[in-house]
Amino acid sequence: MYICLCNAITDHDIRRAAADGVRTFAELQNRTGCADCCGCCEAEARTTLEEAVVQVALDLPILVAA
């Protein structure tokens, strides 16, 4: 699904950015250009990034205390 129509950024692009280490909206904007034109997509982009960051954290292996 397209999140940012101005820059053709999809939810997949945002999830991939999170998987590659993007953690803040400012980093997402720098990496993708998302929400730097009209800004209509900012709320949806932020939500998608937050959900993706949580998912990345859940996907990390749990370290067992020695």
Image (cartoon, rainbow, N blue to C red):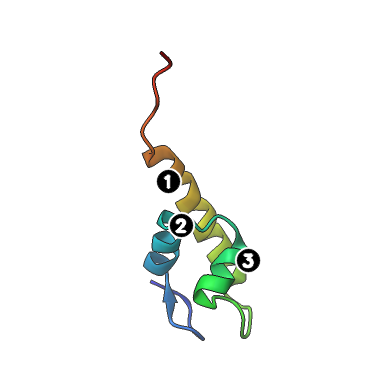
Which residue, given by chain and number where applicable, does mark 2 sit on?
Answer: 18
Circle 1 or circle 2, nearest the eye: 2
Residue at image position (43%, 16%) is 65
Q: Upstream in the sequence, badge 3 or badge 2?
A: 2
Q: Is residue 37 above or below residue 19?
A: below
Quarter placement of the N terminus? bottom left
Which residue, given by chain and number where applicable, does mark 1 sit on?
Answer: 55
Assign a secondary structure to mark 1: helix
Between the C-alphas of marks 1 and 2, the distance is: 9 Å
Whether pointer 1 and pointer 2 mark residues with C-beta atoms closer than 8 Å, the reply is yes
Whether pointer 3 and pointer 1 mark residues with C-beta atoms closer than 8 Å, the reply is no
Q: How many labels were placed on the picture?
A: 3
Q: Residues within 10 Å of mark 1 (few under 14, many from 20)?
A: some
On the image, the x and y values in percent for residue 43 come to: 61, 66
Q: What amino acid is at disc 2? A: Ala
Q: What amino acid is at disc 1? A: Gln
Residue at image position (49%, 50%) is 53
4 vs 66, nearest the viewer: 66
Q: Upstream in the sequence, badge 1 or badge 2?
A: 2
Q: Which mark is residue 26?
A: 3
On the image, the x and y values in percent for residue 13 come to: 40, 68
Assign a secondary structure to mark 3: helix
Circle 3 or circle 1, nearest the eye: 3
Q: What amino acid is at disc 3? A: Ala
Residue at image position (40%, 25%) is 63
